[in-house]
Amino acid sequence: MRPVEILMTCLALAGAIFLLMGYPATQAAILTFIQLILLLLVIHIGVDGPRWQLTPLYVAAAALLLCALTLLAVMGVNAADLHWTHLVLRSAGALVLILTGGTLALCRLLPMFRLPTPTGPHAVGTRILYTVDSMRDAEGGSRPDCHRELMVQVWYPAQPKRGPRAVYRRREETTLKSSHHSLLRTHSLRDAPVLATDAPYPLLIFSPAWTGQRTQSTFLMQELASHGFVVASIDHTYYSGRVAFPDGRVLDGHMAPALGDFTYLSIQEGLELADQFLHILTDDVIFVVDAMTELNGTPDSGWYHCLDLSSIGALGHSIGGAAAAEACRRDGRILAALNLDGWSFGDVLRHGLSKPWMVIYGKGVEVEPPNPAEQPEGVRRYWQVNRENFAIVEEALRRHGGYCMTIAGASHWNFSDRPLYSPLRSHTGGGDIDAARGHRIIADAALAFFTESLHRRDGLLVADAMRRYPEVALLVQPDDSGKPVVGSRVVR
């Protein structure tokens, strides 16, 4: 809870105890109490903004105001005539106590969480870009009679200054349940100027998970930007979550097919479906590289000569990680790819990737059932694809000299901000690993990988960075010459 909310809660608890205990109060004390409630409500609504988790507290505040006015009205009346009034006030005190407890529970279960503070030397700025691909139709196809619109959010090294910090998500990009995300402040300065003195910066393109959102891994975007990277994250229209355009339209991914669900699809049909949409997401990644390249060459864009176009990488979560690798294979400008806990598809699955490539898997949370023969056919297909995909990718990484890494206790959603949303793992999908530690490992691995592969530093920075984490197993890594390690499966 934020400071004003804590004060409101304490005031409500004090009022509830006063009513329950029947303490006498002077007119001045009651008036002061009314003024405090109203003042805190005005500050809260005007500065912090209301949120639905505090609805019980708002009701409690209204009840306390009503009780205070009642006490003012009955002052001077004979105590013998106030039996029912005292009973009502004590009942109101009990109600306020229950409502305040409900508020505390809701704020605990769905808190105003805090993102980890970036550790790099740079202040972080962020801005949202509206881009249009006139060569494709709205859904990513090749019909020439339409165009594909994408919202892109960029995090970057910014000029250090005092200014408004960006919200986690804009209100129109949230649902009723997640509306408080539009009140959360990140560590990024909204629309701050790019720090030109240390430019140009390497460019990274991020793709979220299927039906995820561009802000889903803000912890990682801010960390990379603080260390001198420009990171552009894509909302894949119709295949991401809620996407809000400048003209007020809001689209979402509710019609996107359930990729990875083999209940009604054979393995071959499921892979073909994934390949179909992978192609669209990959085109989005390549288009954003084009868009950022154009901005880098436009004098009045705010990005003029700020991007190092000889150092471009791609990363993504889940199928976004597959799109990052596929774009890296298809586009010669993209030099390295990082897949965060995603299956691989397309040509990368069939032929591998002969550029710097790293895949990080969560391990020890989602495990294959011990009796697969007794599972429904769709479940058996899922686990067969999981085994085969892992084996093919691991072999390709060994063949070409990439990284394959696992994090014990991390689930699929530990690669996003979701473990911070609530302490209930059933709500967030987080694994057994502490959320902050999981984010620290992922951020350190990503930073080391892109520093090694794009800055062309000597030595294996990933291996050095991961030695401090016993949860990490490097199953595959290149040797000092960049060639695959031959021999031991687990390299420490």
Image (spheres, helix red, strand yellow):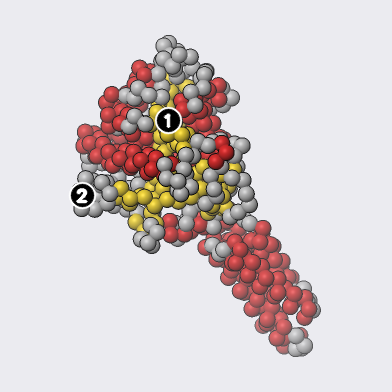
In the rendered view, does 121 fall on the left or right side of 36? Answer: left
Counting the numbered discs, the total is 2
Looking at the picture, which amino acid does disc 2 mark?
Pro
Few, some or many residues within 10 Å of mark 1 (<14, 14–19, 20+): some
Percent x, y for residue 390?
35, 26
Q: Which residue has dot 2 on it?
A: 144
Between residues 125 and 187, which one lies in front from this camera angle? 125
Percent x, y for residue 144?
20, 49
Few, some or many residues within 10 Å of mark 2 (<14, 14–19, 20+): few
Comparing marks 1 and 2, which lies closer to the viewer? Answer: 1
Give the alpha-carbon distance from disc 1 to disc 2, as whole Å: 31 Å
Write the residue at 45% across / 46% down.
299
The N terminus sits in image quarter: bottom right
In the rendered view, does 257 fall on the left or right side of 365? Answer: left
Figure check: 309 above or below 55: above
Percent x, y for residue 405?
45, 25
Between residues 405 and 155, which one lies in front from this camera angle? 155
| Element at label 2 | loop
Query: Mark 2 and mark 1 in contact (Cβ < 8 Å)?
Result: no
| Element at label 1 | strand
Work out whether residue 461 can be spotted: yes
Write the residue at 41% across / 42% down.
297
Which residue extends farthest front?
A: 299
Write the residue at 47% across / 44% down.
303
Mark found first going from the N terminus, 1 or 2: 2
Q: Kindly indicate the quadrant of the structure image that contains residue 286.
A: top left
Work out whether residue 373 can be spotted: no
Looking at the picture, which amino acid does disc 1 mark?
Ser
Q: Kindly indicate the quadrant of the structure image that contains residue 117.
A: top right
Q: Which residue has dot 1 on it?
A: 310
Q: Kindly indicate the quadrant of the structure image that contains residue 325.
A: top left
